[in-house]
Image: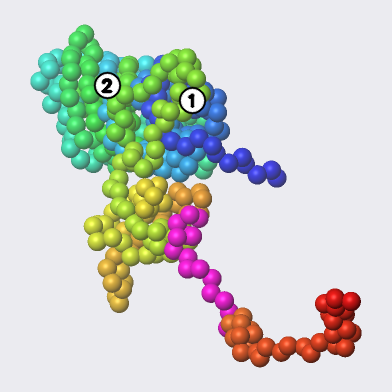
Amino acid sequence: MARRRPAVVHGIIAIDKPLSMTSRDVVNRAMRLFGERRCGHAGTLDPDASGILVLAFGRATKVIRWLTDGEKTYATTVQFGAETLTDDAQGEVVRTAPVPSPWTEEVISAAASANAGGLIDQVPPAVSALKRDGIRDYERVRRGEIIEREARSVRLDAVRTIAIGDAQAQFEVDCGPGFYVRSWARDLGVRLDSAAHLCQLRRLRSSGFSKGVLLADLEQMSLEERRALLLPIESNLPMPTIAVDARTTVDLVDGKKPAAPSEAQVGATVLVLGPDQQAVCVAGVHEGTEGDEGAFLRVIRGLREDGAAALRAEITPPEMPSESELDGVDAQADAPTVQSKPSAETTVADSSLSSDG
């Protein structure tokens, strides 16, 4: 089996995903534009949603799980009066109900922001990218299977009502990973003794990114200009950063559990930077066991692909000669100098060369 070609492009970029494209479509286009096959995205956006889609290339793909865990903000429009199979405008209507009454911003806002500011239980949509036994839910729905969905604990940070119109309302929603705005819209309809579904969705912010590059603009750039837009892992992960010395860097690369710097908080997940300011790994900070001094670092995901060779050379002492080699040198130094006595033939030859005759 042929070995995979090493990645040559590394970094993170936020794309402004257009409507009608799947997240996978965007990844495929980006692979071609940046000339790099190792590429992934941090959080799926449905074809009917637009906005910030964070992409990672090369070794940055190793931190996608933490990019996905970042906070997100959505702008959404909710249609009241009908609930659909998919909880959005693309699905078949499965239930209708009168528009909430009274239809006032005060009533709608109070219901929309209920339970915001913490964890809530949420049942995902029937048609989603969630996997069960290796098969995504939307594939099961296409087969005609009935999906039994269990509630999950997700984070709803805040909801702001932007405007209300004719049986529609616009909101901005701040949430954590795994939150489905479609499900939230469906549940909002139930809370208001009505029915509702999502009719528009745009991601405004994801993992600290609030502005994305248009694919159309990337198409007009040279390869060098595109690659210059990539941001390094070292400054774009939503987690604390700690710096370590060369010895600790090498220990982490070798899979050891070195002592954590004093500023590292026990229980935290941190990005570790070496003395060359390159990312070493994502590590957990653990409390030392009895007899150990202080906390220690345990690698969760290694990020150095060079084995920290240069740093390893800095801390490796020069190789000393072995004891047998030293004994050989001493023996040569102590041996007496012996001068050979010239032979008769040599004496004759030398005397002839110096003769005046």
Whether residue 311 is in magenta: the answer is yes
Q: Which mark is residue 224?
A: 1
Q: Position of residue 97 (x, y in %)?
A: 26, 17
Q: Which mark is residue 305?
A: none
Give me the residue at 47% from left, 68% from top.
317
Q: Position of residue 224 (x, y in %)?
A: 49, 25
Q: Position of residue 200 (x, y in %)?
A: 32, 17
Image quadrant in which the C terminus is located: bottom right
Q: Secondary structure at mark 2?
A: strand
Residue at far left of view: 106
Give me the residue at 31% from left, 24% from top.
211
Q: Secondary structure at mark 1?
A: helix
Q: Is residue 349 above or below residue 34?
A: below
Mark 2 lies on residue: 75
Along the viewing direction, whichever of 196 and 269 lies nearer the viewer: 269
Mark 1 and mark 2: Cα distance apart in space: 34 Å
The residue stretch that appears in magenta: 309-324
Image quadrant in which the N terminus is located: top right
Label 1 neighbourhood size at 10 Å, few (<14), some (14-19), many (20+)?
few
